[in-house]
Image: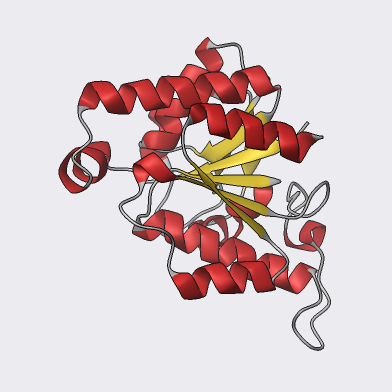
Amino acid sequence: MLRVSLTGPGNIDHHFSKLLNIPTNKFEKHVNEIAKVLADSGNEIIFLLDRGVAFEIAKKYKEFNGRKVFGAVPKQDKNFGIKHLQPYITIVDEIIDTDNWYKQDMINAILGDVVLMLGNSLGSLREITAGFYLYKLFQGEKPKVDVTNKRIHKDAVAGDNIPFTLLIYKPFFKKKLNYEIEVYIKKSKGQIFYIKNARHLKKILELLSA
């Protein structure tokens, strides 16, 4: 069993309708199919408890009787607060406290064995780059820095079961990930898969779980 961290745009209308020109019915079909694959796989999911594509998939995952939904929440934050996250708590089985928003942004990705990237936004790109930077440190790639995932957060699992892996859901992207970012992810001993559709997602999750 793996834990899949979901990350993607928060503003669905702006990103998927206006930027990518994906019709609403087609977007909803993708969401349903992704959620069904995740639920049927027996894997857990985690996401930042906020609006957006990750929340929509988490809702459907619950409807399909998915194994477990973790919600990442910076409960101790003093600068921005978490009142705006309250409407999304109802679908969560367990909350993981990420302390504050700055730490939340840094560690959201490493709370999963795998990150499913559902679109390229400022937030999702930040989470991916921060996650793989930390993973680089876990791999001993920075001289004189000795740190493990559990020292960063007790619920971090990146690298525990499989090499930290990024799954990029291609239908939700205009172009491939930035070339230099790809190279750095691979240099950190991470893996990248470009996912064509939900059937391909199922196949890759089975491969990673084998």
The residue at the point 30 percent across, 28 percent down is 27
The residue at the point 51 percent across, 58 percent down is 127
79 on left or right of 115: left
11 on left or right of 107: left
Image coords of residue 179 (percent x, y):
46, 71
Image quadrant occupied by the N terminus: top right
Image coords of residue 14 (percent x, y):
20, 44
Q: Residue furthest bottom?
A: 143
Q: Is residue 89 visible?
A: no
109 on left or right of 24: right
Image quadrant occupied by the C terminus: top right
Q: Nearer the viewer, residue 127 or 162?
A: 162
The residue at the point 38 percent across, 47 percent down is 119
Q: Nearer the viewer, residue 108 or 194?
A: 194
Image coords of residue 162 (percent x, y):
79, 49
Q: Nearer the viewer, residue 137 or 150?
A: 137
Q: Is residue 206 visible?
A: yes
Query: Residue 86: which quarter of the image?
Result: top left
